Image: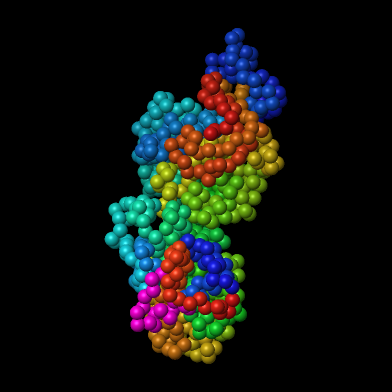
C-alpha cells in the first residue's frame, strides 16, 4: 500500500466499509488478494475531454469514464470546451446530472475563464464555483489579453479557485501544426514553435506572482517552459505544471509519415524537450501527470495532416506509459502515485487521493508487472485516435474501486 | 546502372529516392524527350490506362504538363480541379480518392495545399499516386525537370554550385531540389531573407547565406523562387519593394555572376520582383526549356510508375539511353 498523503509505503491491508476507508474490516467482507501488487489511492486525471454536451459522437460522460476506470482512474476533471461551452451554470448542472446518471468514476467539472472561451469577457466565475467547478480554464484556447487574464486570476482567488491555462500565444503559433524545427522543415508543415508556449508560461508566472494566486500550466511540452516554472517555484510563485504521457514518451520525429495520431496541441517536441520534461517530473517541477484525453471521430482524423483536429485519447494507456518512468528510474513509485493523487487533489481541493480512514474508498490496485498489448478496437472510448495502438505495455490497473465499488477488474484495458 | 532500378508505384517525393533511381528517371526522360520532336507525338506506353489530375490547389503549368505527358503516352485523362470537385461540398479527400478508385483509375496526380496529401492517398489506394506538389513539402517532378535541364546544359550535376534564391521556407520546389541535388553531389547554397531561409536548412546538407552577392558569385546555376504569398505569414519581410532591392536578381548583380551561370525559375515568374525582366528572357535563362523538359520528365515518371505493367505490349517506343553521369 502506497499512500503518499499519509507517508505510508508498506505491506498492509486496506479495509473498506460503506464506501469509506476503514481502520478495521467489516464482518462479512469481500477480499481482494493484492499480494505483490500496489494498492494506491484512486488515481485522478485532471485533464480530460468527455465531449458531453455536444459531441457525443466522439465521447460521452459514460464512455469516457469507462476508459478512466480501465485505465485505473477513479476521478477525472473534465474540460469546459464542450458545445455549448461550460461557461454557464446550466451546462455545469447538466454535466453533473449526466455524471450522476452515467459515470462510473467521479467527474469534477471545470468552468470556462471567458464566455464561449472567446477570451473577451469573463464567464460568471463565482456562479460557476457555486455550481461545483473545481477550477477554471479556457483549455483548447488561451486567453491572449493579459489584462483580462490578470483580472480572471485576481477574481478567482476570491473564490479559492485555481486557474488552469493552456499556454499558447496565438501570434507566435498562428496556424502551426507541429513543432517548429528540423522535422517541420523537412516535412513542409507549418511550425508551432516552443516559444509560443514559453511566452505564455512566462506571462502566467508574472501574473501568478503579481496576484499571489495559483496558475497551473497545462500539458507543458517545452524545455524552456520547464525551466521557467522551476525558477519561479524556487522563489515561491504559485505556479505549477503538468506533463502528458505522449509528450514525455514521443518526439516530433514520429510525425514523419504524416500520421494524424501524432498531431496534438501542444505538439510533440524534440528529444531535448522530452528529456527536460523527464527532469521536470523527476525534480517535482512538473508535479502532475494528466492525459489530455481528447477523443475525435476517425473520419475527422483520417484527413490531411493540416486539417486534422489536435489530440489523442489517453486514459487507457496513461498509467502504463507512466509506470515506464519508474522502470527507467526517472521516478520512484511513490512520486508517481503522488502525481496522480495527492498533487492534483491538493491543487484542486478535492477530498480525494488518500487512503486515510474515513476517506472515500477510491482505490486503484496496480499490477506493475502485468504485460498486455493495447488494442484500440477494444477501447471503451467511442474514438480510436491513439498512436499507441499495438504497443506492448508492462503494468496496468488490475482493479479500480470507486467509493468501495469495484468498477473494473482486468489485465489491461483492452 | 541498369534500367530496372525503379520499383515504386508512386512518386511521392525525392527524399525517398536513391541517386540511381533519380538517374533512371532522367535517362528515361531523355528517351521520351525525343518523342516531342516527332511529327506524331505519341507512344502507346499507357494505352488503356486512366489518369486523373486531382488538383486541389490552382495550377495551370503543372496540370497541363501532366495532362499532355499522359496523352503523349496514350492514356485517358480526366481533370478534377478544386472548383469542380466535390471537396467543396464537404467530402473528405479520403472519400474522393476511394470514389476514384471505385472507377478503376490507374494513376492519380495530386496537387494539394496540405503537405503529406500525396502520402495520405498512397496509403489508401492501389492506383499510382504522383505528387504534383503538396503544400510546402515536395514537388518532385519539378526537381527532376530542373535536374534534367542542368544535366542537359552542364553535362553533369555532381560538383556544380547551385544557388537557390528566395522563399525557401514555404517552397516545395526548394525542398525537392535540395534532396535531389545533394543526393547527386551538387553543392547547394540557399539565400534569401533570414526569415524565409532559416538556419535549420543547414541540417539538410545545404549552405545558408544572407549575402546575395556572395551566394551568386561562384554559382554555376541560379534557381530563383517566387515569394509564396499564398502560404506565407504576413510578418516575414517588410515589402515586395524591399525584397527586390535586397534579394532580387538585378542587372548589376547578374553582371557579377560567372559568365556561364545559368538562370532557372520554376515559374510563374514575377517580372521585376525576384528577377529583372530582361534577365528572364536572356540567353542564359533556361526557364522555357525547363517547361519543355518538364513534359519529358513527367512522361518518364508516369511510365516508370504505371507503364511497365504493360510490359507484354513491348511498345514503349523509346530506347534506353545507356547512362549519363551516374
Q: Quadrant of residue B121?
A: bottom left
* A324 sits to left or right of B98: right
Model colouring:
rainbow
Inspect the magenta stretch and tell me whether residue B36 lies in it.
yes
Residue B237 appearing in the image: no
Residue at 37% across, 43% down: A115
Q: Position of residue A182 (x, y in %)?
A: 57, 61
Please tell me how many numbered marks the rendered image carries: 0
Quadrant that contains the C terminus of chain B: bottom right
B217 relative to A286, above or below: below
Q: Position of residue A37 (x, y in %)?
A: 66, 27
Q: Nearer the viewer, residue B167 or B141?
A: B141
Residue at 56% across, 25% down: A409
Residue at 45% across, 85% down: B285
Q: Position of residue A396 (x, y in %)?
A: 60, 33
Q: Nearer the viewer, residue A116 or B41?
A: B41
Residue at 34% across, 55% down: B103
Inspect the magenta stretch and tell me whether residue B318 lies in it.
no
Q: Quadrant of residue B297?
A: bottom left
Magenta residues, start to end:
B30-45
Q: Position of residue A1 (x, y in %)?
A: 66, 25
Quadrant that contains the N terminus of chain B: bottom right
Q: Quadrant of residue A244?
A: top right
Residue B156 appearing in the image: yes
Amino acid at each position: 500500500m502506497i499512500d503518499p498523503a499519509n507517508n505510508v509505503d508498506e505491506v498492509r491491508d486496506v479495509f473498506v466499509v460503506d464506501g469509506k476507508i476503514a481502520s478495521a474490516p467489516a464482518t462479512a467482507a469481500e477480499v481482494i488478494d493484492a499480494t505483490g501488487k500496489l494498492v494506491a489511492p484512486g488515481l485522478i486525471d485532471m485533464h480530460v475531454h468527455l465531449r458531453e454536451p455536444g459531441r457525443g459522437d466522439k465521447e460521452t460522460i459514460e464512455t469516457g469514464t469507462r476508459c478512466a476506470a480501465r485505465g485505473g482512474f477513479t476521478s477525472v476533471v473534465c474540460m469546459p470546451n464542450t458545445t455549448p461551452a461550460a461557461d454557464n451554470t446550466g451546462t455545469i448542472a447538466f454535466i453533473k446530472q449526466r455524471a450522476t446518471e452515467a459515470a462510473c468514476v467521479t467527474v469534477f467539472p471545470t468552468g470556462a475563464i471567458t464566455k464561449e472561451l472567446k477570451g473577451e469577457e469573463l464567464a460568471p466565475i463565482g456562479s460557476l464555483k457555486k455550481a461545483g467547478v473545481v477550477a477554471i480554464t479556457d483549455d483548447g484556447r488561451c486567453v491572449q489579453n493579459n489584462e483580462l487574464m490578470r483580472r480572471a486570476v485576481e477574481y478567482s482567488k476570491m473564490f479559492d479557485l485555481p486557474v488552469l491555462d493552456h499556454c499558447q500565444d496565438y501570434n507566435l503559433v498562428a496556424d502551426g501544426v507541429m513543432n517548429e524545427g528540423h522535422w517541420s522543415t523537412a516535412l513542409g508543415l507549418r511550425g508551432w514553435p516552443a516559444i509560443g508556449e514559453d511566452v505564455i508560461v512566462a506571462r502566467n508566472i508574472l501574473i501568478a506572482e503579481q496576484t499571489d494566486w495559483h496558475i497551473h500550466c497545462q500539458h507543458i511540452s517545452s524545455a524552456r517552459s520547464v525551466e521557467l516554472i522551476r525558477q519561479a517555484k524556487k522563489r515561491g510563485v504559485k505556479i505549477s505544471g503538468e506533463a502528458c504521457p505522449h509528450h514525455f514518451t514521443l518526439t516530433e520525429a514520429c510525425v514523419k509519415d504524416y500520421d494524424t495520431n501524432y498531431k496534438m496541441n501542444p505538439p510533440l517536441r524534440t528529444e531535448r524537450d522530452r528529456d527536460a520534461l523527464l527532469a521536470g517530473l523527476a525534480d517535482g517541477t512538473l508535479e502532475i501527470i494528466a492525459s489530455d484525453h481528447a477523443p475525435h471521430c476517425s473520419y475527422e482524423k483520417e484527413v490531411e495532416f493540416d486539417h486534422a483536429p489536435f489530440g489523442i485519447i489517453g486514459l487507457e494507456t496513461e498509467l502504463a506509459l507512466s509506470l515506464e518512468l519508474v522502470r527507467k528510474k526517472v521516478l520512484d513509485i511513490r512520486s508517481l502515485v503522488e502525481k496522480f493523487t495527492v498533487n492534483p487533489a491538493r491543487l484542486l481541493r478535492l477530498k480525494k487521493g488518500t487512503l486515510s480512514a474515513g476517506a472515500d474508498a477510491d482505490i486503484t490496485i496496480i499490477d506493475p508487472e502485468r504485460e498486455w498489448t493495447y488494442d484500440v478496437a477494444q477501447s471503451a472510448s467511442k474514438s480510436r485516435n491513439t498512436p499507441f495502438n499495438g504497443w506492448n505495455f508492462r503494468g496496468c490497473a488490475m482493479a479500480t474501486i470507486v467509493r468501495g465499488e469495484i468498477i473494473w477488474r482486468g489485465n489491461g484495458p483492452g | 546502372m541498369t534500367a530496372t532500378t525503379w520499383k515504386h508505384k508512386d512518386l511521392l517525393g525525392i527524399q525517398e529516392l536513391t541517386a540511381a533511381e533519380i538517374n533512371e528517371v532522367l535517362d528515361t526522360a531523355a528517351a521520351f524527350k525525343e518523342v516531342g520532336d516527332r511529327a506524331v507525338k505519341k507512344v502507346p506506353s499507357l494505352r488503356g490506362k486512366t489518369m486523373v489530375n486531382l488538383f486541389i490547389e490552382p495550377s495551370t503549368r503543372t496540370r497541363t504538363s501532366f495532362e499532355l505527358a499522359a496523352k503523349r503516352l496514350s492514356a485517358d485523362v480526366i481533370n478534377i480541379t478544386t472548383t469542380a470537385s466535390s471537396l467543396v461540398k464537404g467530402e473528405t479527400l479520403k472519400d474522393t480518392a476511394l470514389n476514384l478508385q471505385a472507377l478503376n483509375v490507374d494513376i492519380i496526380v495530386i496537387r494539394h495545399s496540405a503537405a503529406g496529401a500525396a502520402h495520405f492517398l498512397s496509403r489508401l489506394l492501389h492506383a499510382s499516386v504522383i505528387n504534383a506538389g503538396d503544400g510546402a513539402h515536395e514537388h518532385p517532378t519539378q526537381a527532376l525537370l530542373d535536374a534534367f535541364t542542368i544535366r542537359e546544359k552542364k553535362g553533369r550535376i555532381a560538383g556544380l554550385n547551385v544557388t537557390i534564391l528566395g522563399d525557401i521556407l514555404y517552397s516545395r520546389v526548394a525542398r525537392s531540389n535540395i534532396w535531389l541535388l545533394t543526393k547527386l553531389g551538387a553543392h547547394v547554397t540557399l539565400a534569401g531573407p533570414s526569415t524565409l531561409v532559416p538556419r535549420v536548412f543547414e541540417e539538410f546538407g545545404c549552405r545558408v547565406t544572407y549575402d546575395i552577392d556572395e551566394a551568386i558569385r561562384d554559382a554555376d546555376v541560379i534557381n530563383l523562387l517566387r515569394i509564396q504569398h499564398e502560404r506565407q505569414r504576413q510578418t516575414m519581410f517588410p515589402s515586395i519593394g524591399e525584397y527586390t532591392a535586397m534579394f532580387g536578381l538585378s542587372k548589376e548583380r547578374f553582371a557579377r555572376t560567372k559568365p556561364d551561370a545559368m538562370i532557372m525559375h520554376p515559374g510563374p515568374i514575377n517580372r521585376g520582383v525576384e528577377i529583372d525582366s530582361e534577365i528572364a528572357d536572356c540567353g542564359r535563362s533556361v526557364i522555357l526549356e525547363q517547361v519543355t523538359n518538364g513534359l519529358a520528365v513527367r512522361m518518364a515518371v508516369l511510365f516508370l510508375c504505371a507503364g511497365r505493367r504493360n510490359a507484354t505490349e513491348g511498345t514503349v517506343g523509346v530506347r534506353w539511353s545507356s547512362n549519363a553521369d551516374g
